[in-house]
Amino acid sequence: MNNLINNRIAAIDIGTNSFHLVIVEIQQDGKLKLIDKQREVMRLGISSGDNLSKISSSEIKKAIEILTHYKKLAELYDASIRAVATSAVREAVNKEKFLDAAKEKIGLDIEVIDGRTEAKMIFFGMAQALNLENKKVLAIDIGGGSSEFIYAENNNPIITESIKIGAVRLSKKFFPNFIITDEAINACHSYVNAQLSYVRSLLEDKTFDQVVGASGTIVATAILIQERFKKPKYKSLNDLNFNNKELDLIYQEIINLKKPSERKKVLGMEEKRADIIPAGLIILKTIFELFSIKEISISEYALREGIVLDTIKKFSLNYLKVE
């Protein structure tokens, strides 16, 4: 993206489990006005290959359809587009095929970012949703292909890490056909523990004033807890909290439902997440245990808002809060 059109930015987040679009306008007072927001469940790397190593032709076709729609919306609003891809695309052995298809078919340049850059952008999005100033913060984002961890002090990210554990990735690895068994649950827990050992070592001498979570699994869990405990509902999930006891209860309820068809019936369950939610909850519960987390605050803002803010910084523009 070489210029800004009408001070409008369209940020596209191409994730492993879903694609997101947010379109904002930079107003004269420096604030950001939300114009449009879209989300489409779209999984990459799950149809073929080991792990998330290959994006299938059918996945590319569907992805191009979604991205075509997003590009048309951006053009409708005269917004400059910045498209960023994460875990599934950066790992795919045929990622050039995907990137070339987007360029050739719809003229969309996709930027593939590394895990630490992704983590940093996620945190900048979170910092716009919540007041994290003068605090030591552990920020967590559990996605489809990876999970990001950020340790920040006074809004400054000091440690940024991305670990290859995500709800889609681990569902594929441990729960074929999304049917869960006690043996597979235990194996998944052990795997997550091992994968998180490095992050745990990095943070072992850190203390946190606040723990913040964003994106798929964490937001989905917050909604399940909100329904289960009949918590008040607001327009935004920002600053909604849940604690370890509430998580444990939801975890036990979901993990006892062996099939997606059973999990779909749970109040507050997003139908298209019922298949991968056990893997996501295993990751989240393990994180809570490893870092002795008692409570987590929700941020509705994550990577896509971080893309907007990073883009503004590149153009040396001033900004305040998203309205």
Image: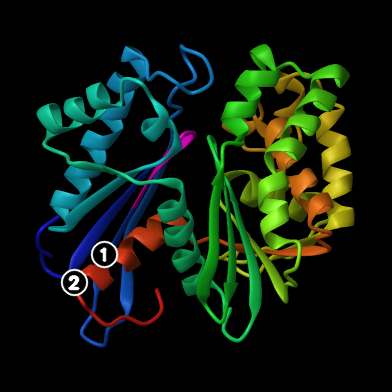
Q: Are marks 2 and 1 in contact (CB under 8 Å)?
A: yes
Q: Residues within 10 Å of mark 1 (few under 14, many from 20)?
A: some
Q: Nearer the viewer, residue 273 or 46?
A: 46
Which residue is depicted at the point 21% across and 47% down? 73
Mark 2 lies on a secondary structure that is loop
Quarter the N terminus occupies: bottom left
Residue under circle 2?
A: 315
- Is residue 2 on the magenta stretch? no
Give how far across and how far down residue 246 sits, in percent: 85, 54
Mark 1 lies on a secondary structure that is helix
Give the magenta part as a residue range. 16-21
Considering the whole magenta stretch, tell me its main secondary structure: strand
Viewed as shown, does residue 121 lie left or right of 106?
A: right
Which residue is depicted at the point 46% across and 27% down? 43
Q: Is residue 260 above or below residue 87?
A: above
Q: Nearer the viewer, residue 250 or 164?
A: 164
Q: Nearer the viewer, residue 299 or 75?
A: 299
Q: Is residue 222 visible?
A: no
Q: Is residue 93 above or below residue 235?
A: above
**CA distance separating discs 2 and 1:** 7 Å
Which residue is depicted at the point 76% across and 35% down? 266
Q: Residues within 10 Å of mark 2 (few under 14, many from 20)?
A: few
Q: How many marks?
A: 2
Viewed as shown, does residue 220 lie left or right of 112?
A: right
Q: Is residue 187 visible?
A: yes
Give how far across and how far down residue 314 sits, in percent: 22, 68
Residue under circle 1?
A: 311
**Amino acid residing under circle 1:** Thr
**Amino acid residing under circle 2:** Phe
Give how far across and how far down residue 190 sits, in percent: 80, 31
